[in-house]
Image (tube, helix red, strand yellow):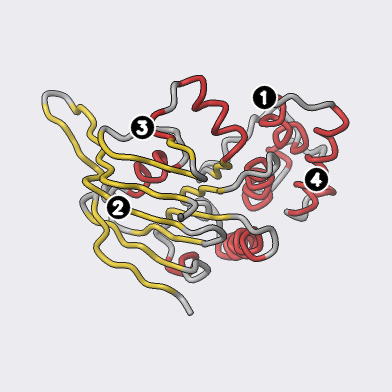
Amino acid sequence: MSLIELRGVTKTFASGAESVTPVSGLDFDVEQGEFVCLMGPSGSGKTTLLHMLAGIDRPTEGAVVVNGERVHEMAASELARWRTRTVGYVFQQYNLIPVLTAFENVEVPLLLLKMSKQDRSRRVTTALAAVGLSDRAHHLPRQMSGGQQQRVAIARAIVTDPVAVFADEPTGNLDREAATTTMTLLRRLVDEFGKTLVMVTHDPQAAKQADRVVHLDKGKIVTEASHA
């Protein structure tokens, strides 16, 4: 069984008097340790699909199974606990808390788990070291570059040791040098740490790092290509 399995997934939103269906009847699998990139024009359903994979949103129809767990059937409280222990999420806008240091931002997900302060500190220190920011632990976001802030966000996404990491346009706000550094780091998460990664991007250079590129249009998969 694949780590991630979607079967017959449809998502419909109300938009005024009409309804919008960004994802329609989708079947989609991701293997353990695979890096998959989702591409397509605006409105093709990429981010909606990513949100359903991460348990941020629910399908209107169909099944979402991650690591053997039926995410689409979970109650809201169960879903919140599942997200904390199972998935990490990297946002385009970083979503760091401006009054917290890098260390404190990375620590936030661990505060939702039963864990000693010592264990939290050890995990945060390890995550910051993994993204090469041990020397920025006590810096605030405004004291760091965009690339450094995105690396803090990646550290926050992996600090709980999730089985899967989801990234939504992680290089969208970065210059080319910072984007290259970020993609090298995401590739390392797969190759060295064994993470499963699904990423949405419009950037062809970023997509080259993936094992498989899936193109969507109007809520359906139109092409797939694997990289050797």
Residue shown at 39% from the left, 59% from the top: 202
Q: Residues within 10 Å of mark 2 (few under 14, many from 20)?
A: some
Of tags 4 and 3, the one toward the viewer is: 3
**Residue receiving disc 4:** 136
Q: Is residue 112 left or right of residue 125?
A: left
Distance between the Cα atoms at labels 3 and 1?
22 Å
Q: Amino acid at mark 4?
A: Arg
Disc 4 or 2, which lies upstream in sequence?
2
Q: Amino acid at mark 1?
A: Leu
Distance between the Cα atoms at labels 4 and 1?
24 Å
Task: Identify the mark at residue 58; answer none if there is no mark.
Answer: 3
Q: Residue pushed farthest right?
A: 118
Residue 56 appears in which quarter of the rendering?
top left
Residue 188 appears in which quarter of the rendering?
bottom right
Q: Amino acid at mark 3?
A: Arg
Task: Identify the mark at residue 171; answer none if there is no mark.
Answer: none
Give residue 216's position: percent from left, percent from top: 28, 57
Q: Residues within 10 Å of mark 1 (few under 14, many from 20)?
A: few
Residue shown at 43% from the left, 53% from the top: 200
**Residue receiving disc 2:** 27
Disc 3 or 1, which lies upstream in sequence?
3
**Residue receiving disc 1:** 112
Of tags 2 and 3, the one toward the viewer is: 2
Distance between the Cα atoms at labels 2 and 1?
32 Å
Q: Is residue 153 above or below residue 177?
A: above
